[in-house]
Image: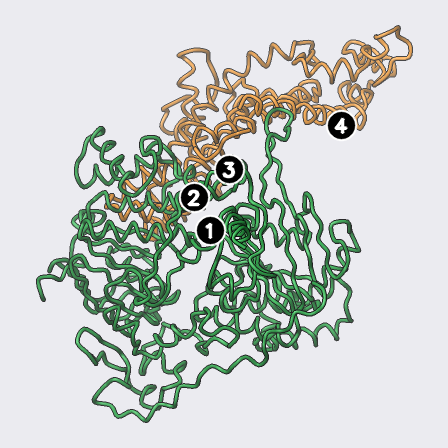
Chain colours: A orange, B green
Amino acid sequence: MLAYIVRRVLYAVPILIGVNLITFTLFFVVNSPDDMARMHLGVKRVTPEAIEKWKRERGYDKPLLYNAGAEGLDKVTETIFFQKSVALFAFRFGQADDGRDIGHDIRQRMWPSLAIAVPVFLVGILVNITFALMLAFFRATYIDVWGVVASVVLMSISMLFYIIGGQFLIGKLWHLVPISGYDDGINGIKFLILPVVVGVVSGIGSGTRWYRTIFLEEINKDYVRTARAKGLSELRVLFGHVLKNAMIPILTGAVVVIPLLFMGSLLTESFFGIPGLGSYTIEAIQAQDFAIVRAMVFLGSVLYIVGLLLTDLSYTLVDPRVRLQ
Amino acid sequence: MNDRTLLEVRNLSTWFGPEARPLRVVDGVSFRIGRGECLALLGESGCGKSMTALSLLRLVPEPAGRVVDGEVLLEGEDLLALPEMAMRRVRGRRLSMIFQEPMTSLNPVLTVGYQIGEVLARHHGLGRRARRRRALELLAAVGIPDPARRVDDYPHQLSGGMKQRVMIALALAGEPDLLIADEPTTALDVTIQAQIMELLGRIRRERHMAMLLITHDLGVVADHADRVAVMYAGEIVEQAPRDAFFAEPLHPYARKLFAAVPGFRLRGRRLQTIPGGVPRLDQVFTGCRFADRCEEAWDHCRAHVPREVSPAPGRSVRCHRFDPGVTAPPAAAAVPPPPATAGPAPAVAGPVLAARGLAVHFPVRKGLLRRVAARVRAVDGVDLELYPGRTLALVGESGCGKTTVGKALLQLVRPTAGSVVFQGRELTALRGEALRRLRAHMQMVFQDPFSSMNPRMEVGAIVEEGMRALGLGDAQRRAARVQTLLEQVGLPAEAAHRYPHEFSGGQRQRIAIARALAVEPALLVCDEPTSALDVSVQAQILNLLQDLQQKLGLSYLFITHNLSVVEHLAHEVAVMYLGRLVEQGPVEKVMRAPRHPYTRALLSAVPVPDPRRRREIIRLQGELPSPLSPPAGCHFHPRCPEAMDVCRRCYPQWSEVEPGWRVACHVQTTEDRGQKTED
């Protein structure tokens, strides 16, 4: 088991190096620091001096890969590649274009993101499993048929509709919670309710349909027939036998996204004015702040790799047949 | 209703599919089972046996299937009329069922003890500790060694035979009056089958429990049933006490079943087959449903549904020939199967294929650096010779390595050691294109005709693919050849433009054979080609293979666990145990008077479709050990009833019984030496 984890972590290294190289190429070779500076300063008042100044302030004035003018080890370290890309491995994200420390921002803004993403994730799974079990219990009846139709309708509706509809109905018409905004601590709860509800509701359609398929697949297996032949009630069969087996694909499908919860949701956060990592990324893209975008891309791939590792480990928890070597 | 009757089924009908055109899967079935009696429900796949059983328990998969008519009286109480709640008290308590596939019938994520305990909690209201105690007793009763350890195991930690024992323990937990066993040993090896069937028989006698034994195997029926009911196309066509049935089966279908069983009886001759297929069940029959396949049918059979008549006490049959109210025309004299068109091909010159010291080891990797920690010795030093126009059967239980031998001979897996000489060329040294060219002369037919063909390719393309890969002929010539091949294996020419799923199992195996023959091979490796097929379909395929051998002079390596097939068509046989051959020789000699204790045990475990032939089953202890760590000395000694001291110490050398017949056993060697000293 430990050997397996160590090996998987080692496998992650080349993947991260690859991600790093690709983002470096995209951000600095395809789109050179000069382009960045020009974009930032606006087309009109661009002078070569202004560009140089902008680059110098942000450390983009160094050579890309090799600094011939420096001494000794600095030949390699005093470069954009080393300072901007390799530093990511140490989680040193550097400074944003406005001079703020990105690492500090991320540590600050991940909490609002988690405050929405974690409840959406947990409540969502619970709600989806409940609905899916219900449809499986009433399989091949009108309840099931209409349940599937409703799921398809729910999943066809755009996320934006849920957000705006929710804000209009719950916030504006019923005045139950504020339309948007954020506050720390206990006071924040009233701001979180609406985004969480919207997040859960928007996922019900696809989640329920997916889990229903998993349940139905399990229900047709031989061991379920054995369980029925024992004289167990349909509910006991569903909860004692089917659910246990269906949890294998459900859990492993869910575990992979757990680390990504840190990243927040782009749409929800920006529409509800939540100062999380999702809105951070959106704002950075709008402001053409590539330092932040690069940091978030790298962080995303690290978290995804962690998610895949967790998925494999979670197999051993829910499936006695799996032993990692 | 007499008071010895436990279960009486009257006019049971179960339909599937759309209301407008339902499939009458079970169509008016009636039978009764007495207390402690074993009734065998015999029939080929798709005849409605399993659905009958599931209908009794009301476990037919709904809503596709439904019991539409009939009564199931358990001691006079109609189970079909019970509310679902009350029915649940019957399931697992008064009627239990064990299923065909022990691999999939147990819940993989729950321990064995828990799954047994569920029944005990449900029907006997036992508490936690009482459940565990009882589960241990049950596991011991079904012969699971070390129950205290096994009770906390998950199903995947048990072998197939052990899983089926757990299934039996689970079915017995409710102390049922009637046990329904649906093909309980079909998925198991013959020695394990013997163990399981013996266990069921013992338990049945001890508990005076009735059993409905569903099977397609006449041999199993002969050994274990008290009475027999033969099912065909959703209907019971004959019922009889066992001995009377085996002495003289009445219904033409039942007689055909007997004639299709391979064995020494018809060696070298063609097996009888049943022409055509089972009629579609989505119709209301206006005549006998077997009429179209029956050689004794006449007009009357197609116009009138036969009623059930009783030609003798305790017997019934649905056939106009036995109906005293119908005057039948004289039956055509039964045509004996045509004799072999030619004697067995003489063994000429050198072998087509010769393997020396063939070994295939699979590495087991462990640890951080994936170092090879152990080797699975799947094949460990096998010598084989295959002559032109002859059939060599390779037999052994599952996991003994016989399929790996087949693949290694064709270089589909690379042998770890040894040599394979095919038509004078060493194959193990060949690579790439040279090997590909030579593949044209050796082909393989696989076990499962359902998964071994690309479902998205037309049959014509499947058959043609090999020729195209080797660049044989042009498109036109190849198309013509496909037609010839399809005809040769008995398929209509238009089959070329259809897809595999449109064909039955037997037809698909014909396609597989046509595909293999397309490149004109000299050698065909057949890996269990008939084990997924019904006995009447198997007979067709075996006939086809024999015809092709005589016509084309093919050599077959026939990999199988079915010894009666070996008796029927093989010339030589090689018996394999745990990666090595233990006995090898001509079929007539080896199968009639086997020398190796393993061959003897294997042969004795095969059920024979004749209840008068009482045979002593040599019971093997335990199961096939792991090829990861074969036992020291003779691999077979831990299970061998004749093991001596020397067997534990060293692996026996080959000793020759007579030219062409050798055996690797210390017992044999010692006897030889004894004879020599006497001389």
Q: Chain of mark 2?
A: B
Label 4: how many Cα within 10 Å (few below 14, some 14–19, many 20+): few
Q: CA distance from mark 4 to mark 2?
A: 67 Å
Q: Quadrant of residue B64?
A: bottom left
With B223 as the anchor, is B155 left or right in this view? right
Tag 3 residue: B631
Q: CA distance from mark 4 to mark 3?
A: 61 Å
Q: Are marks 1 and 4 in contact (CB under 8 Å)?
A: no
Label 2: how many Cα within 10 Å (few below 14, some 14–19, many 20+): some
Residue B653 percent coordinates (x, y): 58, 46
Q: Quadrant of residue B294?
A: bottom left
Q: Amino acid at mark 3?
A: Pro
Q: Which mark is residue B639?
A: 2
Q: CA distance from mark 1 to mark 4?
A: 69 Å
Q: Quadrant of residue A57?
A: top right
Q: Are marks 1 and 2 in contact (CB under 8 Å)?
A: yes
Q: Chain of mark 4?
A: A
Label 2, secondary structure: give it.
Answer: helix
Front residue of this view, candidates B661 and B515: B661
Q: Which mark is residue A26?
A: 4
Label 3, secondary structure: give it.
Answer: loop
Q: Amino acid at mark 4?
A: Leu
Q: Are marks 4 and 2 in contact (CB under 8 Å)?
A: no
Q: Chain of mark 1?
A: B
Front residue of this view, candidates B516 and A275: B516
Mark 1 or 4: in front is: 1
Instruction: Say if residue B394 shows up in the picture.
Output: yes
